[in-house]
Image (spheres, helix red, strand yellow):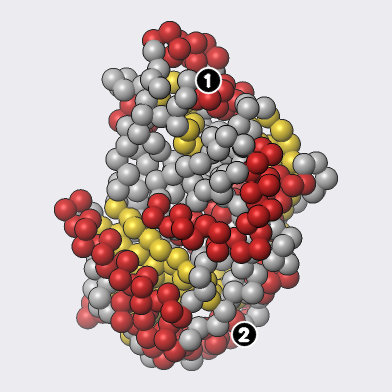
Amino acid sequence: MTTTTETLNTLRGAVRGTVVTPGDPSYEEARRVYNALHDRRPAVVVRAADAGDVSAAVRHAREHGLPLAVRGGAHSVAGFGTVDDGLVVDLSPMREVRIDPETRTARSGGGATWGDLNDAAHAFGLATTGGVISTTGIAGLTLGGGMGHLARRYGLSCDNLTGAEVVTADGALVSCDAGRRPDLFWALRGGGGNFGVVTGFVHRLHPLTDVFGGLTCYPLDETVIGAWHEAATAAPEELNIILVLALGPEEPFLPERWHGRPVCAAFTCYSGPRDRDDRVLALLDGLGPVVGRFMERMPYPVINTLFDEQLPAGLYHYWKGNFSTGLSAGAAAAHAAYGATMPTMESDTALFPIDGACHRTGPEETAFAYRDADVSHSFGATWRDPSDTAANVAWTRAYDRALRPHTEAGGYVNFMDTDDQDRVRVNYRQNYDRLREVKRRYDPDNAFRLNQNIAP
């Protein structure tokens, strides 16, 4: 269905925020998302000022038969935060973060980014597991699981979620936690955006000020990849090492002869005491021949900004993701082969360790089911010229085919694209049927289907 001047005026009268439609001066900016691959034209964008605006927008979409997309930080690589000829609920104005240092919790609006939360919590010497790019939205990352630098020590982002406020498909605003609507709260912790619009999050915080972190680069080699897995999963939980396969960055810490050449980069965050920093360096030295290094003590929020400039909004992205228990020789070989043919300077593979505290939550305690996996494989192409789309998508799909025999059937939903809907059941394993029941209760008409969808 389409909107009319009359219905739009009614919507404008119902919200405190801004209603943007085609032809408005701010429309082009309002419809833009992080991934330029998704160049869509919504019929209306509601820039919500509060949960009441979200409720009005959800009811409007339902009453007028409009497809509904929800945008938090807008980083959804699959483009779920936008839709052609539908309604987009844009939560970006809702970025307030309030810290309670006594209870060690953060209350964040649905549009807040990890940079917002990290900075607010750091003022009180606190932190929690968030993304590795500060502009990533709290909402999408947490709802899909949430891997980051502190995951081995403190668990996934969803493990640190202690409560939420949600606008459901009928426009009602409800609260949930372990005691109130525990079924909905369980589903939000890894089940994605299937059940409503989360307008507020409560995260558990932990004492932390500074970390020892940065990048250590090695030549791309299967033995380095294997050595990383052995070291990263045996290390103390305060030490998190994400292995990045990429073309050597044009940075001062890396000799010029390695610029643009395939490298393995150990993206390291050590949250332990500074008198053990030397042990971290010794461990990193043991992974292979070091060709460049940038490591220093820094405030925790800073380590989450190191890749912000390399991955700004407006580039084209196509990603895939898998889990594995262990890292086989076949998986290392596949990564080495495709790492050697990385198509652009912005493309990369990231191997996240997800053991430690992540394994101390049971596979059915939250919707995030792969509690036995210890590696999350994220890989894909990022490019600048739309004429290169077909070649970059083909490269990523070939990479995925080469890796699949060496990984689990399922993967991390936040790394999935729109053509991965056939993997949704295996992504949630034994939790899928329970998630369907929650979906049936809170969204029986599947209004929130623009995600890695669990059908009611």
Q: Secondary structure at mark 1?
A: helix
Under circle 2, the secondary element is: helix
Q: Quadrant of the C terminus?
A: top right
Could you tell me if residue 84 is visible in this image?
Answer: yes
Residue at image location 31% in from the left, 77% down from the top: 338
Q: Report how many numbered discs are placed on residues in the image.
A: 2
Which residue lies at the image location 37% right of the left edge and 70% below the top edge?
Answer: 400
C-beta proximity under 8 Å, tags 1 and 2: no
Q: Quadrant for residue 165, please give it.
A: top right
Image quadrant assignment for residue 425: bottom right
In x, y percent, where is residue 326?
55, 83
The amino acid beneath tag 2 is Ala
Q: Is 300 left, or right, of 351 in this rendering?
A: right
Q: Residue at x 43, y 57 (%)?
A: 420
Could you tell me which quadrant the N terminus lies in? top left
**Residue 10 percent coordinates (x, y):** 49, 11
Image mark for residue 63? 1
| Residue 274 locus on image (x, y percent) | 62, 75
Determine the residue positioned at 64% across, 33% down.
Answer: 168
Name the residue that disc number 2 marks.
234
For residue 388, above or below residue 269? above
Image position of 96 with respect to 192: above or below: above
Q: Position of residue 354 (x, y in %)?
A: 59, 71
Furthest-left residue in this view? 387
